[in-house]
Amino acid sequence: MDAPGDPEGPRPPAGDGSAGSAQETPRRLSREQLFVLISTASLNLGSMMFYSILGPFFPKEAENKGVSNTVIGMIFGCYALFDLVASLVFGKYLVHIGAKFMFVAGMFVSGGVTILFGVSDQVPEGPMFIAMCFLVRVADAVSFSAAVTASSSVLAKAFPNNVATVMGSLEIFSGLGLVLGPPLGGFLYQSFGYQMPFIFLGCILLLMVPLNMCILPNYESDPGEHSFWKLITLPKVTLIAFVINSLSSCFGFLDPTLSLFVLEKFNLPAGYVGLVFLGLALSYTISSPLFGLLSDKMPHLRKWLLVFGNLITAGCYMLLGLVPVLHIKSQLWLLVLILVINGISTGMSVIPTFPEILGCAYENGFEEGLSTLGLVSGLINAMWSVGAFIGPTLGGFLYEKIGFEWAAAVQGLWALTSGLAMGLFYLLEPSRRKRSKLQNILSTEEERTALLPDEIQP
């Protein structure tokens, strides 16, 4: 992995010759960069383990407490809703709060509320149990939002010329969390009961806090002049945000629905249901570093990775439950195969989003520094949260009304729409830029012509 030797060095615009810049930098990681990698890896692992640990057993446990599928979907989805709001706030005020403090404090609070979630089974069923679940999920969403927004900004600051490569490589730990979460959660739940998965994971998160307090660098930066509104209203950024929404919605859709579908269709025990999620997690883990490296070495391919990854994801969801009109019998091996392809296509689409938005921001006058990185990181987290809220909420409702097969197909339509819209934008982008250049040239000529009579007067 090529990494710049000086994290404070000049940053070329993302998407323009970043591969060449990376080749001019030394290959050895500095001590500071190594510590940033360790801190971000620990967060990715912990956050994805908690994100995925609920899938195999919580929906069934909640059903036993008298909670409907729609409310279960809302419990999953409220995490994303508050993550959305918190990401925008933390991204805007990152440099005021301090990236290191935001990272460490977020991880500490998250560890505590994860343990608290484990005692929710002691709460009486009905409204009190539902309120407890919502309260803990909201607190965890805000705390993890702080940590993730800070970590993405610090990572991009430490590796300015290799953002996609490093982020793609660290998705190994996100994928590892997705891989370990479902089977580990299912095993601990089967062996020791409801409380143990949350207590185990909460303790791991709390043990990571002193480590990150010691090793995470403390970057300083001046507040920037630009806002989320200016960033999100850039046409290219708006469409990429739509793509991020569709991808996160697809991921979130599986949380309250897939385990119930597998239990009902294939009669698997809870411990084995977690293994079904491995197809998605492993393929995403393995493919993400490759797409990150490809994205940095060949920046011109980023847009097509993003577009085609989204279109393939759309196809996967239309085939995930095998819509009845296809008249194909659902089989477990086919379901796992589609999840594997979906993991690859998601990595193909997700990895280029950060450098694409960052490059667009620089092209439109955003200053280089931690302030812009905080805006981009917060925006991506917020847009991911929009889809992650809609996916489980709508998924739980549609599962209840029309079944998993049709619900998955409806979910795929969102990814198809965003992929086609993004592809159309990229196809029209060259002609739009030519028109913009021509208008600039004509306006310059008009100004010179207007000044010319004054210049030749005696």
Image: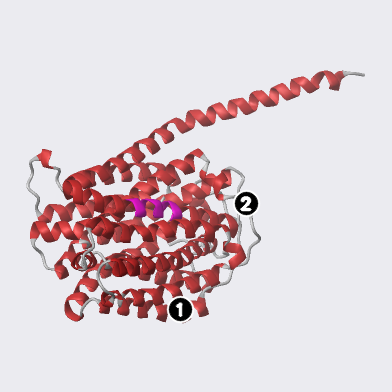
Q: Which residue is mark 1?
A: 209
Q: Which sits in the foreground, 429 or 9? A: 429
Q: Identify the image quadrant of the N terminus.
A: bottom left
Q: State the mark number for residue 360.
A: none
Residue range in magenta is: 381-390
At x 57%, y 54%, the residue is 372
At x 29%, y 54%, the residue is 392
Point out the frontmost of discs 2 and 1. Answer: 1
> Is 159 placed left or right of 43 in the picture?
right
Coloring basis for residues: secondary structure
- Point out residue 230 in the picture as x, y percentages from the top left corner: 57, 45
Q: State the mark number for residue 367.
A: 2
Q: Main secondary structure of the magenta part?
A: helix
SS under mark 2: loop
Which amino acid type corresponds to the residue marked 2 in the rendered image? Glu
Q: Is residue 227 visible?
A: yes
Q: Quadrant of residue 195?
A: bottom left
At x 13%, y 52%, the residue is 334
Is 382 inside the magenta-drawn segment?
Answer: yes
SS under mark 1: helix
Which amino acid type corresponds to the residue marked 1 in the rendered image? Val
- Point out residue 290 in the picture as x, y percentages from the top left corner: 35, 56
Neighbour tally class for label 1: few under 14, some 14-19, many 20 plus, Cα within 10 Å: many
